[in-house]
Image (spheres, rainbow, N blue to C red):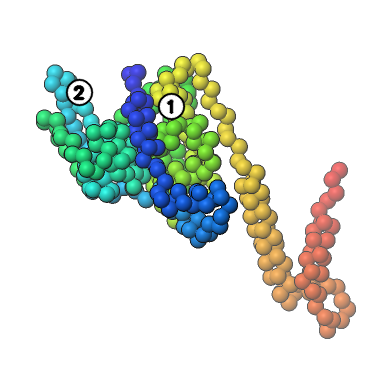
Amino acid sequence: MQNRSFIDPELFEAHKNAQKASEVPSGAQAAKADARMKGLEVNVDDEFSVKKKRETEHTGTLALDRIHSSLYRPINAKAWSKSRWISCLKCKTWRRISLALPFESLLNWDCSQHSDEKFNDCSKPLEELHGGEIKLKGEEHNKSYTEEKDAFIDHLKDFLKKFKFPALRTPLLGGKELDLYRLYREVIYEGGYDAVVAKPGTWSRIFRSLENSHIRKKITDASYRLKWYYVECLYAYEQFHFHGKDMKTIQVPSRPKRSSRSATKRAKMKLDKFTSTFWHQAKFMSSQKQWGSIVYQSGSSHAAPPSKIQCVKRHVSSIHKRVPAAS
């Protein structure tokens, strides 16, 4: 197996630092921060809109006309070198970015987030193509990405096989295969597994950026399952290739426990379902003409029919009588 990583840690770190530097609060946000520090009132509607914006920030996918790839083979080199290009949201200028970045969810990417100081502003010139560099757009870009993803999966399988991990099985989430290559880049973009775990709500945000979240059926345990799939398939790979740790020192986390809040919610749903089903059965039986004559043994045919509660109690009592006692 080739000892290489699909994501260069140094190049990634440069992009990450550029992203942090570009996240400077606007004048309005700075004023709100000052107001909080001074104990002044802040518009609740504005706070809600900001929260809503953050929640929906990663729910879309970058348009195909804002991304393409390119291939270039340096002189005296046997292999082709691949690059990714993204269009700035503000000035529409094309910039070369790292293959490490999860371009699919970079909807608000602009020149200020570029890692190279030569191109981190909209006023700076366009980066020139290398001699003989070929652009891949549209379907050609999609085909190139598929080949890139397949190469990553093969590399991951070889890694798991070499270090005697269970064989890789592509997990399903919401009835759709999970793109492990994209999941890996999304988690690395946040700083890795430990960084994602340390920031509550990040697993949920990553899930909303994936295509698996676009299905109609709601997945209530998506964050838990996404975390477990990552631990099972990608955690050791990340520690070894991205962080450069020795395999002997890597301890794969145990299966993450579900939150008590989720467990309580599921138990309540089951109880509500059982109660509803039992009540509908009792309601149906009490509406039958024969039910009163069987359960309510009365000598008079004109006797008043029993109530629903009486029907249920007597039905349960008759069941207990028919069940033989434990020996």
Side of 186 where 137 appears, left or right:
left
Q: Nearer the viewer, residue 187 or 301?
A: 187
* Image location of residue 23, percent across then percent down: 39, 42
- The residue positioned 74% from the left and 72% from the top of the image is 286
Secondary structure type for disc 2 = loop
Please rate how many residues cluster around mark 2, counting C-alpha atoms within 10 Å: few if below 14, some from 14 to 19, many from 20: few
- State which quarter of the image contains the C terminus: top right
Q: Nearer the viewer, residue 34 or 11?
A: 34
* Image location of residue 221, percent across then percent down: 54, 46
Residue type at tag 1: Glu
Secondary structure type for disc 1 = helix
- Label whose residue precedes the other's in the sequence (1 or 2): 2
Specify the quadrant of the image occupied by residue 84: top left
- The residue positioned 82% from the left and 56% from the top of the image is 320
- State which quarter of the image contains the N terminus: top left
In the image, farthest residue toward the bottom: 302
Please rate how many residues cluster around mark 1, counting C-alpha atoms within 10 Å: few if below 14, some from 14 to 19, many from 20: many
- The residue positioned 18% from the left and 36% from the top of the image is 127
- The residue positioned 60% from the left and 41% from the top of the image is 258
Residue 70 versus residue 252 in the image, above or below = below
Residue at which label 2 appears:
79
Residue 110 versus residue 184 in the image, above or below = below
* Image location of residue 304, percent across then percent down: 82, 80
Which label was assigned to residue 238? 1
* Image location of residue 317, percent across then percent down: 83, 61
In the image, farthest residue toward the front: 38
